[in-house]
Amino acid sequence: MASQLFTPLKIGPVEVPNRIAISPMCMYSADDGSASDFHIQHLSRFGMSGAGLAVMEATAVTREGRISPGCLGLYSQANEDALARVIAIAKKFALPGFKLGIQLCHAGRKASTPYPWDRGAALTPEKGAWQTVAPSPIAFEKDGAAPLELTNAQIEDIINGFGEAAKRAVRAGLDVIEIHAAHGYLIHQFLSPVSNQRTDDWGGSPEKRMRFAVAVAKAVRDSAPSHIALGARINSTDFLDEGLQVEDAIAVAKALRDHGFDYVCVSSGNIVPGGRPALGPGFNVERAARIKRETGLVTRTVGFIAGPKHAEDVVSTGGVDQVALARAFLDDSNWGWHAAEALGHPFTIPPQYQRVKAGSWPGAKETRAFT
Ligand SMILES: Cc1cc2nc3c(=O)[nH]c(=O)nc-3n(C[C@H](O)[C@H](O)[C@H](O)COP(=O)(O)O)c2cc1C
């Protein structure tokens, strides 16, 4: 039977050649927000990987919106120029039809964290720590430093920051812009009653908590021309009784759709530390399928989808349009080639690598049989 995973997909104005997306992954390798040579090899590998789309890591729309000092940003001309250089090279070597997106983010109360390989060593002011901001002055970690409550003017500045970063993303050559409204970052901090306890027009009822997400969506929509696909990563659940539930996610998705967004990428958890139970393969698929059914939006999902047959099942019978894989592509940057091989789908790999195409190298089975 023909593979559904390898059929093209229209995401608003953008067509991707298959339903495999590489999920955004922070690489902590930027310099004051500017992409580095690290990103050249990283994204170039992804362009050749067989995925139809890669969404670049959480990219801060303001300097203090970075998760860590090494996070990518799009808040300066230097950031834009560095990104444009990386994208031009990655696209030059990419397989036909490959599209590149970016995830625009503000980390809010989850900003100013150390590099993950320095965990345990707190980020001190000497090492570049900064004051965080959030909808309400509630620390993310129980004993962590409290963020400052955002003023109206600061909220407007951040919304503008999303719009300006979207313009930079378009000029830098990206095809898809995704806002990060999940995993406990600022947009999600406004959405979730766990982190938003404001009593003004930015908090309280579900509609008021959604106001920031909608304002960001409008700013991005107004900044991006019609050939750019727009989407959002959203949480389908906070895994907390007092947090967001799938019905809230459906309301958010509908609001984004009604403001011209083309897709959602459905994830979950992380509004509080350790805010995820033990999770099995494809742990967001069912909620993602429900969001798709109730909104009609192009829907991607993510979360422990690692094997080609599982990915194939999610898009052929799971009720979801596209899968995003993160760790699988870090582990095997040719995952797309190997998935095509496993599913018996004809696939053209770059000519320089033809000596390892399916069936032509007897060692192929051994290199993939470690486990
Ligand atoms: C190294 C690393 C960095 C990540 N950075 C981001 C990020 O920038 N934005 C985001 O939405 N998710 C991020 N994630 C989460 C992944 O995109 C994905 O949702 C999660 O790893 C589950 O997918 P997987 O089971 O395919 O790895 C990151 C994950 C990893 C492993």
Image: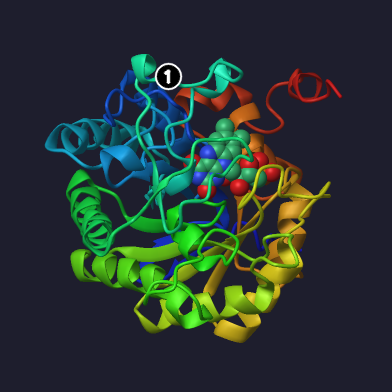
Which element type, helix, strand or loop, lies under badge 1?
A: loop
**Left or right of 19 in this view: 162:** left
Q: Quadrant of the N terminus?
A: bottom right
Residue at far right of view? 371
Quadrant position of ligand 1: top right
- Colouring convention used in this rendered image of the protein: rainbow
Q: Amino acid at mark 1?
A: Thr
Between 203 and 44, the one nearer to me in the picture: 203
Tell me the residue at 83%/20% (across/down). 370
Between 293 and 96, the one nearer to me in the picture: 293
Between 209 and 97, the one nearer to me in the picture: 209
Q: Is residue 57 above or below residue 17?
A: above
Tell me the residue at 23%/54% (across/down). 161
Q: Quadrant of the C terminus?
A: top right
Q: Is residue 186 above or below residue 225?
A: above
Coordinates of residue 235 in the picture (x, y in percent): 60, 62
Coordinates of residue 216 in the picture (x, y in percent): 32, 66
Coordinates of residue 44 in the picture (x, y in percent): 40, 30
Q: Work out whether residue 315 can be spotted.
A: yes
Q: How many marks?
A: 1
Tell me the residue at 16%/34% (across/down). 81
**Left or right of 159 in this view: 67:** right
Query: Residue 266 appears in which quarter of the rendering?
Result: bottom right
The residue beneath circle 1 is 124
The local crowd at label 1, few if under 14, some if 14 to 19, many if 20 or more residues have their Cα within 10 Å, is few
Coordinates of residue 131 in the picture (x, y in percent): 36, 36
**Left or right of 261 in this view: 240:** right
Tell me the residue at 21%/42% (across/down). 75
